[in-house]
Image (cartoon, rainbow, N blue to C red):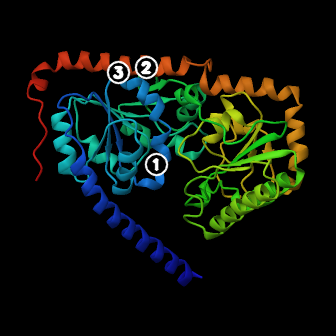
Amino acid sequence: MNVIGDAQKAVQLGKKLVDNRRAHMVLRQKVRSQPPLEPERFKIAVYFADESVNMYQIRQWYKPLIELAKTWPVLILSRGSTAALQLFDESPLPVTYVRTVADLEKTVARQDIRIVFYVNQNAKNFQMFRYGQRWHVFINHGESDKMYMTTNQFKAYDYSLIAGEAARARLERVLWDYDFDKRALPIGRPQADHFSGALPFTQDDRIVVLYAPTWEGDRAAAAYGSIASHGVGLVRALLATGRHRVIYRPHPRSGVVNNLYGQANREIIGMLSAANKADPRAQHVFDDGSEIGWQIAAADVAISDVSAMIYDRLATGKPLMVTRPVSKRAKIDAGGYLSACEWLEVDDVAEITEQIDRLLHDPETVERIATWSQYYFGDTTPGTATKRFHETVQHLMDEWETHARIHEMDLAERTVDSPH
């Protein structure tokens, strides 16, 4: 078994090396074709050190950052070749590829970057932390009750932008001697102000069910994925009714670690295709697009694993269910929304249609979701989160100006160490 696992890892590593080499060749051409960045233009940078497999983490920030860039120009600093390749093709914001630390230093030296945003905890973030005289701000890539949201790594940043009261309470339980009033700034969920996208189906009387599972995870404590346990049976049951439309949006990393998840993922995609061929009016959707939002808003019921998708859906105030992880070692924060959510046990998958009917006609569900939505995101009135985001950035810029006056002599000598 270990031999097979090692062989699979070797194949994956080989594929990754080939992909990176190919990306580097194409990147050289794209980098050469990019016009030089205007000096001193950008005040805010988004530092993204990952490869393309984690593009979903930065994509969800595109629209909020486009709005912010109308006031404060924003530049994406990409460190990974495959990610840079995609960013050059799709990013609505300016992108520069800083493969080496020397490349990074040159860019930092030529721009007036006062705030650096981080969407994840990549180890290479520390290569950017070396630059002082600016704020390093963790903005994350979603709100959830996963253990990722309580890491002590929050302390590495000058500030963190959090969703609301729930996020602060979660962090207060684990971060010792941390100034929450100063460093943990609540902004809600600005992405929710930008839920959009054309529906890939014609609306009718079918009940639309969004099934948005996460990946299998890379350790037992984070094994939240349901594709192999719940997914196939769940989708099969919904396709059989003739009165449901399934939107299937799997996590882009599904099957990266465990091939069983990859097989189950492919089986579900095949079932959707076969169902559409049998009844073209069904218009079931396999969604692997970069745009997120329309799925959350369009679904009558959403089914998600323990992931950030729960909390994006929670902000809509519409019914949702959460799959119960089959692994007893999966760590679940039972003190937040998950203590009151509608769990979907693996043994109840066969009765999913009855579960959905109950959710849609249960008056207590609306009140319960509204209460938890307020706890996690504060005021979810459209536009409010965006306003709070912009006000928070203005606050940080004002703080920068205050410290710039205090350290005026230091700023006069503001330089970046030359690369060695």
Task: Tell me where residue 118 appears, x and y as whole percent.
Answer: 39, 39
Q: Which residue is mark 2?
A: 390
Mark 2 / mark 3, whichever is N-terminal: 2
Image coords of residue 240 (percent x, y): 87, 55
Give the quadrant of residue 343.
Answer: top right
Q: Position of residue 340 (x, y in %)?
A: 77, 35
Inspect this view and state whether residue 311 appears: no
Which residue in the structure is indicated by mark 3? 396
The residue under label 1 is 55
Q: Amino acid at mark 3?
A: Leu
**Disc nearest the viewer among 2 and 1:** 1
Disc on the earlier residue, 2 or 1 = 1
Disc with the residue nearer the chain's start (1 vs 3):
1
Of residues 40 and 284, the one drawn nearer to the viewer in this rendering:
284
Residue at 45% from the left image edge and 42% from the top image edge: 58
Label 3 Cα neighbours within 10 Å, binned few <14 / some 14-19 / many ≥20: some
The reply to whether callout 1 and callout 3 are in contact (CB within 8 Å) is no
